[in-house]
Image (spheres, rainbow, N blue to C red):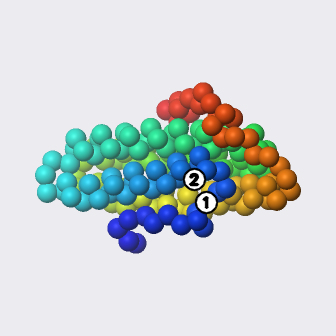
Amino acid sequence: MSNTFLWTKNYSVGIDLLDSQHKTLMELTDNFVLGCIEATSGDIKPYFKKQITAILDYLVLHFRMEEQLLSILKFPAAAAHRRGHARCMGEIYYWLNEINSLKSQVILSFTRYLRERIFDHVTGEDQGYGRYILHLKRRGFQIPRSECALAGTENEVYR
């Protein structure tokens, strides 16, 4: 796996807001991984805790917005997609509970896991609803403007 995520149009799900969030998640995660690698020579704990909190807060917000949009669009696999989000968050929180010692090797293993999980979600699981959205657009369905449809989204779903 390369050192950085490279966004391509193949990763697009057809909704600019979600594509932008996916790019941001990939960048946040990539910067986190690279920062952890650089920080292993010093005290990694403050950096790790601050950055993982920022990523998790953004991930919770993104998942909530994505789930609301899939519900609005009546995506047939919305429930399964939501379960995938819950599973992803459960895995991340499991890892975080295992990292109490914050040993460098455990942290590096976690950062590799997190990076792969975010990438796999965006480039794999989310492509299912991307195909659905493309199908709707081809049939003339007007996709609600995401910023309006998702206004007031709370980020307390997975906490």
Reply above or below: 40 against 159: below
Residue at the limit of the structure toward the bottom, as seen here: 1
Residue at 74% across / 54% down in the picture? 133
Three-letter amino acid code at the position of disc 2 = Asp
Residue 35, position in %: x, y? 26, 54
Residue at 49% across / 44% down in the picture? 59
Q: Mark 2 or mark 1: which comes first in sequence?
A: 1
150, 128: nearer the viewer? 150
Query: How many numbered discs sit on the rendered protein?
Result: 2
Q: Residues within 10 Å of mark 1 (few under 14, many from 20)?
A: many
Reply above or below: 83 against 64: below
Q: Could you say which quadrant of the image residue 73 lies in?
A: top right
Q: Could you say which quadrant of the image residue 31 lies in?
A: bottom left
Residue at the limit of the structure toward the right, as seen here: 139
Horizontal placement of 137 versus 48: left or right? Answer: right
Kind of element beneath mark 1: loop
Q: Residues within 10 Å of mark 2 (few under 14, many from 20)?
A: some
Kind of element beneath mark 2: helix
67, 31: nearer the viewer? 31
Reply above or below: 139 against 52: below
Quarter of the picture containing the N terminus is bottom left
Residue 153, position in %: x, y? 59, 31
**Residue 154 appears in view:** yes
**Residue 125 appears in view:** no
Three-letter amino acid code at the position of disc 1 = Ser
Report, in whole angstroms, how far the alpha carbon at label 2 lies from the one at label 1: 6 Å
Residue at 81% across / 54% down in the picture? 136
Residue at 61% across / 50% down in the picture? 16
- Give the residue at mark 1: 12
Residue 11, position in %: x, y? 58, 63
Which dot marks residue 19? Answer: 2
